[in-house]
Image (cartoon, helix red, strand yellow):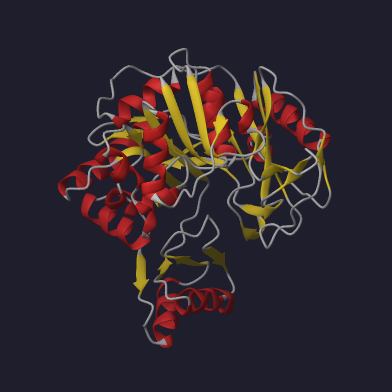
Amino acid sequence: MRILVIGSGAREHALLRGLARDPQVRELHIAPGNAGTHDLATAHSLTIADPAAVTALAVSLEVDLVVIGPEIPLVAGAVDALRSAGIPAFGPTAAAAAIEGSKAFAKDVMAAAGVPTGRAVSLAADVPAEAVDRALEEFGAPYVVKDDGLAAGKGVVVTIDRAVAAAHAHDVLAAGHPALVEEYLAGPEVSLFAVCDGSRCVPLIPAQDFKRVGDGDTGPNTGGMGAYAPLPWIADDLVETVQRDVLDPVLAEMGRRGTPFAGLLYAGLVITDEGPKVIEFNCRFGDPETQVVLELLDSPLAQLLYSSAIGELGTAALQWKLGSAVTVVIAAENYPGTPTSGDEITGVTAPAEDAVVLHAGTARDSGGRLVSAGGRVLSATAHGPDLATARAAAYRIAESISLRGSHFRRDIAMAAEQGKVQGTVQGATHTPR
């Protein structure tokens, strides 16, 4: 199988690493890729937001499958263009990708499907200022305000400060975007991926990511500063519950609307006292959870994604490695603000069977040095027989890397390792196992 992966982050590096382990894969291409992905695949320059350009590259390479990593080409209609050219593509059509492209659309789908989620008010860009105040008053603190559109994981503000919430809402509206004010849902968060073919889905193992930049979940939201899987504290029946109450109803509703969802449906969940509730959907593999979920996958990845693309997912259970995986994101100076770039990176070692540095914002300068080229630069990822071992290994990798001004969280998976996370499902509290 000849495969083209679209994207340039650590998620795409993890996808390539997983695809390269599949014996059915004989040739890998990446567009545009980064300094680390070039070791696994032939790189091509590409404007990923241009569906015609994506299709032209896939046609020229005569690929059997295109795997699209980021949300931008999906929302732009890359899958529509590829399918029109007769090329199987892993991902949803533009109409189906609206489940991430518009949070108001996702809420409407959930309401129609009876999916448990928080209450929300959608504010159009031209609403009067007092409408923001009324919405914040309705839900109370903590306040949750979201940019309705794509915001690279940084369009959400959760705060007890009403002035901060109001300011974010007005900023979103002033930019011409709708805003959502939502009910705050209390409880630990879980990310659950499901590979879908339009009518069926195969859930992967749950993971947990860490969205805020600082230890103890402090500071602004980022695209994600680390993740781990599996989750030792969740209920044994969580995946079954979410498939029954969330995934299957959403797939059915999308089908009823004439926009069947194929590709990767990402359910962002909060495990509340009343059971799991959805806080968001994404239409693609999430970063950094992909880094740990795919590190543990022991089934052929290419066949799974291809089966989704052609609408023929089977019913066989996926196989998973024993143990745990942890990833720690190393970010550039000033991230999640405007990051510095062009600084040399040293200490990145060759991948091992149970540890790898996945590249995201990296490049080679004119002298061949590895340099930073983005906000989230690297993901130090390790697999071990248990969470403590995997976590220690991931941090050894992160600490061995030198990048001026870089930073990373020191508490990824710490609470889970210490048995301090509790999840509740359908009213019952589940203590760590």
Please give left or right for residue 138 compared with residue 296 in the image: left
Residue at x-position 42% and y-position 64%? 183
Please give left or right for residue 405 compared with residue 108 in the image: right
Q: Quadrant of the N terminus?
A: top left
11 or 140: which is nearer to us? 11
Residue 114 drawn above or below residue 292:
below
Residue at x-position 74% and y-position 53%? 341
Please give left or right for residue 409 compared with residue 275 in the image: right
Q: Quadrant of the C terminus?
A: top right
Q: Residue 122, image x and y in percent?
A: 35, 70
- Picture quadrant of residue 426: top left
Residue at x-position 47% and y-position 12%? 23
Q: How many marks?
A: 0
268 or 114: which is nearer to us? 268
Q: Residue 66, image x and y in percent?
A: 40, 33
Residue 106 drawn above or below residue 161:
above
Residue at x-position 69% and y-position 24%? 355
Q: Residue 245, image x and y in percent?
A: 29, 41
- Picture quadrant of residue 326: top right
429 or 245: which is nearer to us? 245
